Amino acid sequence: MNANLFYAAAALGAVVLYLMMERRPAPFRAALSVAGLSAVGLMMTAVARSAPSPDAAGHPGPFWVHVLLALVAVASAARMVTHPRPVYAALYFVLVILAVSVTFLLLQAEFMAFALLIVYAGAILITYLFVLMLAQQSGDQANRGEESAWYDRTPREPLVALALSFVVLATTGDALFRREGTMPWDASPAMVSRASARAWDRLDDMPAKLETVARDAAVRAEPDSSKHAALRSASLVTPETGPRLRPAMNGAAAMVTLRTMDGQDVTVTLDGDAAPTNSEALGHALVAEFPVSLELAGVILLMALFGAVVLARRQMELAEDERRAAAGLPRIGNDDALRRGGAA
Amino acid sequence: MNTALALLADAPVSPAMPASIQVTLVLALLLFAIGLVGFLTRRNMILMFLCTELMFQAAALAFVAFGRMWMDLSGQLFVIFILTVAAAEAALALGLVVLLYRRKETLSNDAWAELKE
């Protein structure tokens, strides 16, 4: 039932997207946006109702923020692929990026949210806008007085494209409604404590941070303020066997032992706030667990750099420079002469 | 949320609501589908590449959502990879587009239909 509602809403969205591709009068456009947004809302409703434990009532905040962000992202994405002016399309893409990065924040991926903003909205989109504006300057529409070129106003094969992506959407969306598979949509306590144990392992790998948070926790737990100075200079105790941090209470907390200057051992209990933050954990995972992927990313960037240099290089024929010199033209390598000669 | 999980509310990693994960996955699906429509219907070469960036975004969103569901960081590490590839792709593709634009003074990809042969 929910799945059928999902497909019907997707079909409605496809029709709206088709109608958006041509230029329409203003009231028609308003009706289109209402229809499109309600189609997306219907899809969200269908999926949320099929969630195993629809506990949205218990946490009204994040869920509705998710839906709102999804509406913003889908609306600006639809406008982006249909807008007749390329620069506006690029600006709508910035709106998509903003919505996606706030969604990342809600999903507790803080580092990725800001990396997305900086790399995409800050760097990649600026490159796109530069190239768009370079190409628009003397574009084909400038001499014809149109607001955008013909190829930006006329979609290519819209019906085939919409049918194809409807099929893609329907086949992949089907997975969201299947329950007999092995997808554990609802986190089990075992999964949470496993993930928590991983987080404590990470903290154990960072001795400097572990010592700082252990000292802070020890000071907070000690009511007698005359002992605080001794606790602040206490150092970590590394046991003969096993890790320094021992998870307790099914992973919700962890114990660590500190030794003060006068040889006194203090056992401190750390709560979830002491665990590594998202960026710390991500950095640790990147270097300690997946170092090859880090190296590969570097190789990809280096190859892109080489490719860009090859593309930007001036194409020269064999011995072109010598022939230019013989004909009295400035040599290519000589920039000053080139600029004076006006050749480029 | 069941009681066993409520006990773990202070744990370093807390579980996500299934409903918000699913809404995020639907968002990823929709962005991918819209990006596909844009890639197929747009004639402007720069905007075609911009639509592939939209599909990259959808993939990144799905990675992060699944990573949140499993409470694992690997999803986010893949997004770092996606960012790298997207940056490299943008630099190279735009360089190519500028070269093509210098030859024919148009951004329409119909101008390069002879490459089919």
Image: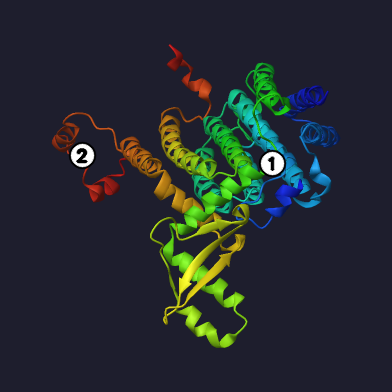
Residue nearest the observer in this picture, A168 or A107: A107
Quadrant (top left/top right/bottom left/bottom right) for the C terminus of chain A? top left
Asked where in the image residue A19 lies, by quadrant, the reply is top right
Disc marking residue A329: 2
**Alpha carbon distance from label 1 to label 2:** 55 Å
Residue nearest the observer in this picture, A151 or A75: A75
Q: Is residue A223 left or right of residue A54?
A: left
* Element marked by disc 1: helix
Dot placed on the residue nearer the N-terminal end, 1 or 2: 1
Quadrant (top left/top right/bottom left/bottom right) for the N terminus of chain A? top right
- Please provide percent x and percent y for residue A22: 73, 27
Badge 2 sits on which subunit? A
| Number of dots carrying numbers | 2
- Please provide percent x and percent y for residue B25: 67, 35
Residue underneath mark 1: A73
Q: Is residue A74 visible to the viewer in this orientation of the structure? A: no
Disc marking residue A107: none
List the single residue furthest toward the bottom: A226
- Please provide percent x and percent y for residue B61: 60, 39
Residue nearest the observer in this picture, A301 or B40: A301
Above or below, comparing residue A88 to residue A122 in the picture: above
Q: Is residue A218 visible to the viewer in this orientation of the structure? A: yes
Nearer the viewer's eye, disc 1 or disc 2? Answer: 1
Q: What residue type is labelled 2?
A: Leu
Above or below, comparing residue A304 to residue A317 in the picture: below
* Element marked by disc 2: loop
- Please provide percent x and percent y for residue A127: 49, 45
Mark 1 Cα within 10 Å, few/some/many (few <14, many 20+)? many
Q: Do labels 1 and 2 share a chain?
A: yes
